[in-house]
Each structure stands twice: as structure tokens, then as C-alpha cells.
Amino acid sequence: MATIFEKIIKRELPSHIHYEDEEVICIDDKYPQAPIHFLVITKKVIPSIHELESSDYYLLGKIFDVIKSMTVKLGIEDSYRVLTNHGSQAGQTVPHLHFHVLGGGKLGAKGIK
Ligand code: AMP
């Protein structure tokens, strides 16, 4: 079954897209946990960081390039948090690799979930 993020990539679900290329898409989180909360999602469906293989590692560089440029674009480059969840006990709800980026205000100690 397609993940929510696959449906967003295919435009079957609406989202606010900040950036997109062949490998990643960057969208606003629908339920933001900070004044600015966006997601950088791989287009390749990898369930989480735990399933990343060495042949996928180039995607991490791409993801962090996008994170850096998006934080500058959104004016939060001085302070932000990046996190990814693996497994339900850690709070993962969508089994499709994505990194949360939170900023724009004082963040709590724990991040999300
Ligand atoms: P995680 O819980 O770490 O797997 O992160 C999944 C994130 O996807 C959560 O922060 C949700 O708020 C977010 N989310 C769920 N549905 C949507 C959607 N349709 N558009 C954008 N973000 C979503």
C-alpha cells in the first residue's frame, strides 16, 4: 500500500511543496510541532534510516543539502533541529524515510513525540 508521502509525491494528496527534484521532496508538516516544521522525504521508498543501504548513502548528502538551503530560505539557519524516527516506539508513523526540520522559536528539550 502506498504511503502518505508517495501519494503526496504523485499529487494524489495536497501538500505545501517547498522544493522537489528527482530524489527528494520537501513539504510542510501537516501538524507542525514548531513555528516552522518541514519534512525532507526521499522519493525512493525506504522505510526508515535503519533500512538504508550503502548504495543509498548519496541520498543523505542530498537531504542535508536541501535542509541547509531550506533553513536559509526560511530564515531559521541560526537555530533548528533535525530528527528522524525509526519504529513506532520512537514515534514513527509513516514508514517512508523522512527528516523533520523544526525551528522558528524556542524548542522543547525532546523534539517531537
Ligand atoms: P513520523 O511520525 O516521524 O513518521 O512523521 C510523520 C509526519 O508526517 C508527522 O509529523 C505528521 O504530522 C506528518 N504528516 C502526516 N500526514 C501528512 C500530510 N498529509 N502532509 C504533511 N505531513 C503529514
Image (tube, grey):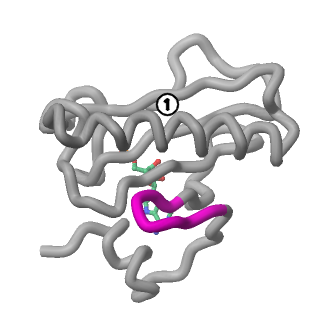
The crowd level at tag 1 (other Cα within 10 Å; few <14, some 14-19, many 20+) is some
Judging depth in this view, the residue of 58 and 101 nearest the camera is 58
- The amino acid sitting under disc 1 is Ile
Question: In the drawing, does residue 22 fall left or right of residue 96?
Answer: right
Judging depth in this view, the residue of 82 and 22 nearest the camera is 22
Residue placed furthest toward the top: 109
Q: Which quadrant of the picture is home to ligand 1?
A: bottom left
Question: In the drawing, does residue 19 fall left or right of residue 45?
Answer: right
Q: Quadrant of the N terminus?
A: bottom left
Judging depth in this view, the residue of 52 and 27 nearest the camera is 52
Q: In which quarter of the view is residue 101 placed?
A: top right
Judging depth in this view, the residue of 56 and 10 nearest the camera is 56
Residue ID for mark 1? 112
Vertical relation: 78 (above or below) 17: above
Residue at 20%, 50% (x, y): give it.
Answer: 46
Q: In which quarter of the view is residue 99 placed?
A: top left
Q: Is residue 21 magenta?
A: yes
Residue at 71%, 42% (x, y): give it.
Answer: 69
Q: Position of residue 70 (x, y in %)?
A: 71, 45
Residue at 64%, 70% (x, y): give it.
Answer: 16
Q: Is residue 80 magenta?
A: no
Element type at marker 1?
Answer: loop
Residue placed furthest toward the right: 75
Q: Which residues are magenta?
A: 19-25
Vertical relation: 63 (above or below) 30: above
Cβ at disc 1 under 8 Å from ligand 1: yes
Q: Position of residue 57 (x, y in %)?
A: 28, 34
